[in-house]
């Protein structure tokens, strides 16, 4: 039994494995999602994120491992017997149904009477701020509105667990940015647990309380987003999360220089080998003994450049040393193909 201070587990995935032919899609994957928590599975395309989600939804049968929801074994059950609401990448809205019909479909599928299904649909539509558009058809909505209809349909099921597969990836960058914040607060309001799949680091960090990083079918690291960024477990994770300064260290390790470990305008002066303007200033590369050090300079910090040189002090204690696992691990999961 869990102690009263820890949230009960909404979803527990234990030692899940799944292959397609000779492709190992998911390998020995274990993860718990607490009640009310939003957890993002983050990883490059093809690393097995959707396969995990599809196994949880019951759309795919695992080779081995267990899936438990609120302590109950789900592994062999069909999708409709699981208490799950799902949002797909392409929204999967019915073109011939109204917005209300689409959203009421969720609870209808789960055998709610029509009036009850429509009541829950209206509630969910109000939550996603689409009241008044109940009678439109999906093709009369913008991409962002369609996305919210899909979300409302999942919310209207009243499920304890929501699964979201790249829910924002069909939207343009500006809308995606706006909806990230919206999605986070909506998920917090529903109090359902949510497992979200994305290949977009910013999306994972913006929406989820915890992030699980996947690579080649395996979970490499899990924790709150800022913790992962501050303490990546390996060089590959650091690179994937966007660290720019990762250098070869001794004995199969890598050294990661986080931005906080660097002081500009102090210490020795180094030659600038490259300089690129960005929307928030510029990025310069200095010829540092650790390796070519890439640094962001604000327009104000630009004044620190003197005669093609910049003084930089690296705080050695702030440099992370991690196993260097960069390399073609992905190829192993496709061995023999
Ligand atoms: P992600 O969601 O991270 O992009 P997927 O779970 O979709 O990754 O895929 C993981 C691996 O399994 C990939 O190599 C993919 O090509 C393969 N795969 C996924 N679904 C199938 C399938 N139905 N048949 C064969 N291979 C598949």
Image (cartoon, grey):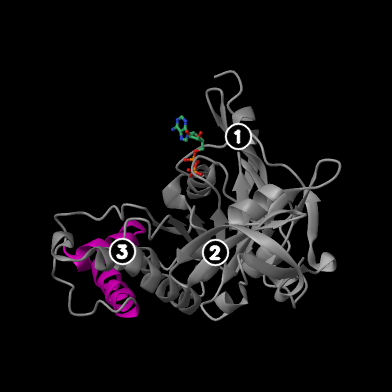
Residue 9, image x, y percentages: 65, 64
In magenta, the rendered stretch is 98-127
Choose top left, top right, bottom left or bottom right for residue 173.
bottom left
Q: CA distance from mark 1 to mark 3?
A: 32 Å
Question: Which of the marked residues, 1 or 3, is nearer the chain's N terminus?
Answer: 3
For the residues labelled 3 and 2, the Cα–Cα distance comes to 36 Å
Determine which residue is flagged by label 2.
Answer: 283
Camera-nearest residue between 215 and 189: 215
Q: Quadrant of residue 233?
A: bottom right
> Residue shown at 14%/55% (left/top)?
96
Q: Main secondary structure of the magenta part?
A: helix
Which quadrant is the C terminus positioned in? top right
Q: Is residue 275 left or right of residue 153?
A: right
Quadrant including the N terminus: bottom right
Category of crowding for the residue at label 2, using alpha-carbon neighbours closer than 10 angstroms: few (below 14), some (14–19), many (at least 20): some
Q: Is residue 127 above or below residue 217?
A: below
State the residue at coordinates (81%, 55%): 321
Precedes in sequence: disc 3 or disc 2: 3
User: Looking at the rendered structure, which numbered label has been put on residue 330?
Assistant: 1
Judging by the rendered image, the residue that carries numbered circle 3 is 147
> In x, y percent, where is residue 257?
72, 61
Residue sitting at x 53%, y 60%: 275
The magenta stretch spans residue 126: yes
Badge 2 marks a residue whose secondary structure is strand
């Amino acid at each position: 039994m869990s102690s009263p201070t820890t949230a009960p587990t909404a979803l527990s995935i234990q030692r899940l494995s799944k292959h397609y032919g000779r492709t190992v899609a998911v390998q020995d994957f274990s993860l718990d999602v607490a009640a009310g928590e939003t957890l993002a599975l983050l990883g490059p395309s093809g690393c097995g994120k959707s396969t995990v989600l599809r196994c949880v939804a019951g759309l795919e049968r695992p080779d081995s491992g267990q899936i438990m929801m609120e302590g109950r074994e789900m592994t062999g059950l069909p999708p409709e017997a699981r208490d799950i609401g799902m949002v797909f990448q392409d929204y999967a809205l019915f073109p011939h149904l109204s917005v209300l019909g689409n959203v009421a479909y969720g609870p209808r599928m789960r055998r709610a009477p029509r009036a009850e299904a429509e009541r829950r649909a209206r509630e969910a539509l109000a939550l996603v701020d689409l009241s008044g558009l109940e009678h439109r058809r999906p093709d009369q909505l913008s991409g962002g509105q369609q996305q919210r209809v899909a979300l409302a349909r999942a919310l209207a099921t009243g499920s304890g667990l929501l699964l979201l597969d790249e829910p924002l990836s069909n939207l343009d960058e500006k809308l995606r940015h706006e909806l990230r914040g919206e999605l986070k607060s909506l998920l917090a309001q529903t109090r359902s647990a949510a497992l979200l799949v994305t290949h977009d680091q910013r999306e994972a960090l913006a929406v989820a309380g915890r992030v699980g990083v996947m690579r080649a079918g395996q979970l490499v690291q899990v924790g709150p987003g800022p913790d992962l960024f501050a303490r990546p477990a390996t060089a590959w994770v650091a690179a994937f999360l966007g660290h720019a300064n990762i250098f070869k260290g001794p004995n199969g390790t890598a050294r990661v220089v986080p931005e906080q470990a660097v002081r500009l305008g102090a210490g020795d002066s180094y030659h600038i080998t490259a300089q690129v303007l960005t929307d928030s200033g510029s990025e310069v590369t200095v010829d540092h003994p650790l390796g070519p050090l890439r640094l962001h300079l604000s327009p104000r910090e630009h004044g620190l450049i003197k005669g093609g040189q910049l003084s930089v002090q690296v705080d050695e204690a702030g440099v992370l040393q991690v196993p260097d696992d960069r390399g073609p691990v992905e190829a192993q999961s496709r061995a023999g193909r």
